[in-house]
Image (spheres, helix red, strand yellow):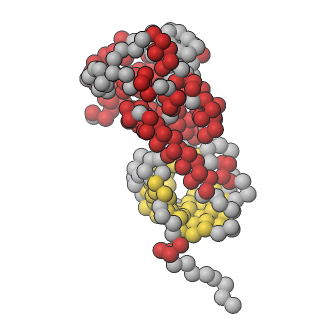
């Protein structure tokens, strides 16, 4: 009796799944005992390994092409390297330095399914936002890119990086519950309408908690708080606002200032930076405004 099986890869491979960052999962083989698949990751993508995925199973990742780095340990993995994960105490965050293909081999039932379910939830949420309001979706994408860059520059990794990135992507998800007429009003808002809009910071609570965690919700709920207490919904000040929310606030305001709206055209990059500078110490954390400005100077160099 033969002791091996041969799989014709083309016949068992599912359609690749497009993930949130337009990375691809290409499942090669799946049974109750183990799964084999390929992750196709873009350059500068963040790939997380979730400890919750590792209950009673072991995963190996072989780098087929490209290069990636563990953001916590700074260890670099290149072609042929094998990453074997038996146990993880917290989320592992890997950053692709080049376009990368990982071959994943996981022992255990449906180990890739969790990744796919989470991914589907995220994609559905993003689609809801897009349907509701094009501006919010595009704004959220741009804010996500700025926050991701700033968080990496500040050395965020693991769970903290995951949380701030998800908060950035979904910071305005509460707008799903706001009346379209108010949301898209091409004129200035009345006081009552403004009060209604302000509710978006916390309206997405159950949606966020069902997909993410308290920590992600906390960042979202505080993204309109300002360090001098003039923000909303609670009027928190200084240190009572978490750093991640302060980072999100700067990136959010920069993008809002530089975007064209129905009733006004956006400021230039220089004008927006000047305004952030003027409000550093009152609305925004000065140290973080400096980091934000450095980010643009670096990309010009
Ligand atoms: Fe907002």
Q: Is residue 39 above or below residue 75?
A: below
Q: Is residue 34 visible?
A: yes
285 and 275: which is toward the camera? 275
Placement of the C terminus among the 4 image quadrants: top left
The answer to whether residue 93 is left or right of residue 273 is: right
Q: Give the x, y percent position of residue 43.
A: 40, 50
Residue at the spot 65% in from the left edge and 69% down from the top edge: 31
The answer to whether residue 183 is left or right of residue 114 is: left
Q: Is residue 11 above or below residue 164?
A: below
Placement of the N terminus among the 4 image quadrants: bottom right
Q: Residue furthest bottom?
A: 1
> How many numbered dots are placed on residues in this image?
0
Q: Give the x, y percent position of residue 171.
A: 50, 30
Q: Is residue 143 visible?
A: no
The answer to whether residue 20 is left or right of residue 1 is: left
Where residue 104 sits, quadrant-wise, is bottom right
Residue at the spot 50% in from the left edge and 31% down from the top edge: 176
Residue at the spot 57% in from the left edge and 58% down from the top edge: 83
Q: Give the x, y percent position of residue 99.
A: 40, 54
Where residue 273 sits, quadrant-wise, is top left
The answer to whether residue 60 is left or right of residue 231 is: right
Residue at the spot 68% in from the left edge and 67% down from the top edge: 32
Where residue 233 sits, quadrant-wise, is top right
Q: Give the x, y percent position of residue 91.
A: 61, 44
Q: Is residue 173 above or below residue 74?
A: above
């Amino acid at each position: 009796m033969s002791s091996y099986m041969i799989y014709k890869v083309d016949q068992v491979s599912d359609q690749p799944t497009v993930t949130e960052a337009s990375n691809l999962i290409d499942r090669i083989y799946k049974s109750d005992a183990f799964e084999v698949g390929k992750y196709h990751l873009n350059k500068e993508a963040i790939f997380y390994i979730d400890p919750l995925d590792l209950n009673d199973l072991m995963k190996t990742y072989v780098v087929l092409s490209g290069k990636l780095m563990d953001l916590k340990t700074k260890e670099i993995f290149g072609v042929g390297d094998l990453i074997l994960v038996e146990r993880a105490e917290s989320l592992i965050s890997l950053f692709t330095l080049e376009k990368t293909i990982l071959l994943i081999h996981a022992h255990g039932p449906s180990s890739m399914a969790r990744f796919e379910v989470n991914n589907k939830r995220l994609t559905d949420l993003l689609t809801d936002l897009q349907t509701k309001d094009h501006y919010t979706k595009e704004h959220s994408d741009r804010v996500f890119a700025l926050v991701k860059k700033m968080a990496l520059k500040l050395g965020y990794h693991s769970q903290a990086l995951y949380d701030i990135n998800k908060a950035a992507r979904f910071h305005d998800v509460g707008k799903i519950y706001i009346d379209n007429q108010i949301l898209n009003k091409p004129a200035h808002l009345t006081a009552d309408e403004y009060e209604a809009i302000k509710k978006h910071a916390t309206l997405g609570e159950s949606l966020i908690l069902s997909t993410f965690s308290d920590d992600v919700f906390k960042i979202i709920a505080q993204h309109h708080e300002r360090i001098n207490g003039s923000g909303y919904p609670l009027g928190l000040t200084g240190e009572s606002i978490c750093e991640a929310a302060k980072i999100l606030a700067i990136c959010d305001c920069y993008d809002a200032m530089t975007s064209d709206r129905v009733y006004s055209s956006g400021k230039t990059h220089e004008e927006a930076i000047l305004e952030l500078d003027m409000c550093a110490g009152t609305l925004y954390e000065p140290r973080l405004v400096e980091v934000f400005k450095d980010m643009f100077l670096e990309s010009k160099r």
